[in-house]
Image: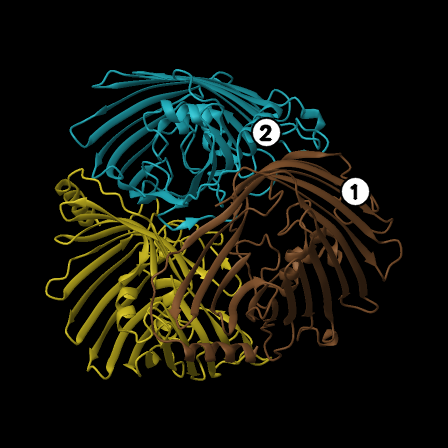
Chain colours: A yellow, B brown, C cyan
């Protein structure tokens, strides 16, 4: 963190006081479709309209200002929209520390709220609420890209805690290097904001990526300190996530693979759970306007027997333009007797789940 | 519903993958004015500043993308603003089904959140949260257009349940035909999203309109299933609304008329209430920049005696430009001994109510 | 108030129905930085990322329409952003009267929600939620301009009740004259919206300013009626604030001074508290892109002995462009034995507080 602020100061010193007018870009996605989900609910299958079948619906405001000397100022504000009911912004993210507003549906600009500086020579530093290096890595590797309600990786990896806990961090600073022949490194730190103990409740992450020709490799490590001054006995409690993934584009088809090793600690004795996750995927163009992608992901619970889960999903998209496409997808989740990932609260443990959807995604 | 999604798929097949850049339009209304209301409150008359004296204050984002081949992609996001205090967006619409976020002040993009496709040849299909066919019909016929705090139709028709229950539906799909010589038909379906029972809690509506020269006729029928799996005994409970209205423009003056027949069912025995509603109205230009409009509406309670209500209102607007006007209006509501429409909670049943306002409406 | 509405009507009569298309401006500030605060909390100092170290982060929408004849229509909608967590908009401002949404973090367009008319000849009238004349005056005089988390004036003046109570008024009308040789007058009225008693809960304020060459003098008086019909015994309860301030620009340095006299009344016997506040400040350019400003402010509690407080702060800003700057600041607050301004709830009365920050502010 200190290094990043120093970098910021250094970048500042290089910049003159040149000014360039630039405009705010209003952008977003509205993604809505029919969805039929059997999540094991006692009453049965649910049919309805869902937001975000392929990508989360969202609205954002962003801009870049050329400061001269190869330096740019950046800002971005982005909010999730539950477009099926119009819900958006909500009550906003409360509290302090990196997990303030951790749940992505917490309202306000829950996805991104940043200001920063970017230089082709020195890299980019952003402050505020932003994606974790873990999310940056798996978004590149996942065939489903930035999500969608049926995508396996966000459901299965890290025991399903990705979207709620590890995807975005508030009160954070993140620094990314420029690309050196396809090689990039990033580091993020989320302040714990705990009185009298800077480390308590803090997050940090480091990531590295290499993109060159057909190959793209991503690595990320995320550490979440869960100690608090109020609970000094648990000051050693941490969640640790390691992720590595890669894609290789053969032209007619692109292969995707990922692996993660996770240790989640909770309060109390013997409260450590270890997971290993695997993903294999494929994506390919299908005709002039079509794309097909599929993935299969495994949650291997290393602490509890008979608590594994698997999810497979396939999606076909048809481009009406660069900004607008139709899509249809199917997913199936199977749980061991001791697992209940993706299930309704009324479903018995170990039940299977499935979903099918048909929708339209429009980027603006 | 199935037909509409099919239509969407068919439209998709016709479209190439052409792309056209288009911009987001930020638009809205800020309408604020002085309002003096006597709603029968025990303490007396209330004077203050009110938002939406002529039209609800709002902010929205919308766009159209030309997909080629006569096909367009559309999106729209629109939120109510309580401009007198700045309240907007709120906690967002919660829950599932067509009535999620039914109350128009529920927050988020509570007015409209849609994505869809439009073709001059095949019509328009939109998914998300949108106006019901009932609202589409009465907005055309009402001299007060899209509302305002003193407009009679939204207060009186359907026993005053228009804005809270029947004006907008979430989790819905709506299809409108192109105009065939002035004739258009629309159909909407709001998914109940009830596990195991697709019909439970669903909505549907059909509308038809004819606009040709001086004549405009609008018809709409809306059916709201109120059954739930949790209450299987009430699986036959429905609200049924039928509406017909027309305007005829004589040039110097335009006449407005509307009629509605409503059956509202609630849980328990003998819990059906029937209403008939009538409206007559007039609108006319008054000088180069002025407009005068007035309406008189009746709520005829067919189930309970002595529970009718009448409301009359008149408004004068003066255009400062096409986007900005001043306005002043007056309304009076009279209730039978058994009716309390438009009254404060502290007012005795059967009391009268009145309001006067003076304000400015600016469209951006 | 009546006069202002009359002025509005008169302005209307002068305007033709000319129309001019104008665009909506999306604007705002994202201000984020590292902050280390010792607010006397029992656990110790808190380090973290804070929004608004120099200026509150915000997003807004505004526009001006040329109505012809020297008349313009104006609207503005502006919301605070807690950019460190992305929190924004929130649940919106609830209730009625001038203090609806009084707390600036209350959500919605909590900062500004107005529509109005502006004429170079007749002045400007705005309706809705807007700044009080008190805030308009001290924003001009304060070396810290529109705030920031460490600025003394908003913490010290009026016993710290500025941002929560006296800075913005809902349900209000405000009229400002044009500048007559540098002299301007403003008046604001916030409707109490109390049934049966127009005066109860209302606000009014009058302000005057003179700006000519190096001299700028600002005066404002704000009266807040706190009576309610529910509490007729307290119908005489009022808060009264008088403020006078001035700046004089010597070129190499600008001097700032302010004085305020306050009487805050609360319910019950002997519940009147009187304060006097003083501020001296200085601001100066430092090099081509640098600015330095500092102020020292005193809260003199005239009712209770040993309950005074002082705060001093200094800030240096470095412009990367006209829209983007880096900043660093330091503040120190000292409390008498009976005062606890700027302290954490766990801090002992009379404790001192200090804060240091380093950040970046970007205007868009």
What percent of the width, then of the height, locates residue A142? Answer: 30, 74
Q: How crowded is mark 1: few (under 14 residues within 10 Å), some or many (20 or more)?
A: some
Cβ atoms under marks 1 and 2 closer than 8 Å: no
Residue assigned mark 1:
B347
Give me the residue at 85% from left, 51% from top: B338
Q: Nearer the viewer, residue A197 or C144?
A: C144
Residue C270 seen in the figure: yes
What percent of the width, then of the height, locates residue C216? Answer: 35, 17
Task: Classify residue B110 by image quadrant.
Answer: bottom right
- Left or right: residue A59 compared with residue B193: left
Give me the residue at 19% from left, 49% from top: A4
- Left or right: residue B210 compared with residue B68: right
Under circle 1, the secondary element is loop
Q: Nearer the viewer, mark 1 or mark 2?
A: 2
Figure quadrant of the C terminus of chain A: bottom left
Query: In 3D space, how far apart are the residues under numbered discs 1 and 2 (Cα atoms)?
Result: 34 Å
What percent of the width, then of the height, locates residue B316? Answer: 66, 39
Q: How crowded is mark 2: few (under 14 residues within 10 Å), some or many (20 or more)?
A: some
Give me the residue at 16% from left, 69% from top: A210
Task: Classify residue A149 by image quadrant.
Answer: bottom left
Give me the residue at 57% from left, 77% from top: B1
Q: Say if A100 sits above or below B239 in the image.
A: above
Which label number is shown at residue C350? Answer: none
Residue assigned mark 2:
C9
Under circle 2, the secondary element is helix
What percent of the width, then of the height, locates residue A67? Answer: 19, 44
Q: Do labels 1 and 2 share a chain?
A: no
- Left or right: residue C224 compared with residue A105: right
Residue C338 seen in the figure: no
Count of marks, rendered view: 2
Q: Say if A36 sits above or below C238 in the image.
A: below
Provide the chain ID for the residue under circle 2: C
């Amino acid at each position: 963190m200190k290094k990043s602020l120093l970098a910021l100061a250094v970048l500042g010193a290089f910049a003159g006081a040149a000014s360039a007018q630039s405009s705010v870009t209003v952008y977003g996605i509205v993604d809505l479709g029919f969805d039929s989900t059997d999540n094991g609910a006692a009453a049965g299958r649910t049919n309805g309209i869902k937001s975000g079948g392929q990508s989360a619906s969202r609205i954002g405001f962003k801009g870049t200002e050329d400061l001269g000397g190869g330096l740019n100022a950046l800002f971005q504000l982005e909010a999730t929209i539950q477009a099926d009911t119009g819900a958006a912004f909500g009550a906003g993210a409360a509290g302090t520390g990196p997990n303030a507003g951790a749940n992505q549906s917490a309202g306000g600009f829950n996805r991104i709220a940043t200001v920063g500086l970017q230089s082709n020579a020195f890299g980019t530093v952003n402050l505020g609420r932003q994606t974790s290096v873990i999310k940056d890595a798996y978004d590149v590797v996942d065939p489903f890209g930035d999500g969608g309600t049926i995508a396996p990786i966000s459901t299965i990896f890290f025991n399903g805690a990705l979207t709620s806990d590890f995807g975005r961090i508030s009160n954070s600073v993140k620094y990314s290097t420029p690309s050196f022949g396809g090689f990039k490194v990033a580091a993020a730190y989320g302040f714990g904001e705990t009185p009298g103990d800077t480390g308590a409740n803090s997050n940090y992450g480091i990531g590295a990526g290499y993109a060159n020709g057909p190959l793209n490799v991503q690595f990320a490590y995320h550490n979440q300190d869960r100690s608090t001054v109020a609970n000094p006995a648990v000051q050693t409690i941490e969640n640790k996530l390691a992720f590595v993934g890669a894609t290789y584009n053969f032209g007619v088809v692109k292969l995707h693979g990922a692996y993660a090793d996770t240790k989640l600690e909770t309060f109390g004795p013997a409260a450590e759970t270890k997971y290993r996750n695997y993903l294999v995927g494929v994506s390919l163009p299908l005709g002039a306007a079509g794309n097909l992608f599929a993935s299969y992901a495994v949650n291997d619970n290393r602490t509890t027997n008979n608590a594994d889960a698997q999810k497979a999903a396939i999606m076909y998209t048809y481009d009406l333009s660069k900004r607008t496409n139709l899509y249809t997808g199917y997913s199936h989740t199977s749980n061991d007797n001791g697992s209940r990932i993706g299930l309704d609260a009324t479903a018995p443990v170990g039940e299977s789940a499935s979903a099918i959807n048909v929708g339209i995604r429009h980027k603006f």
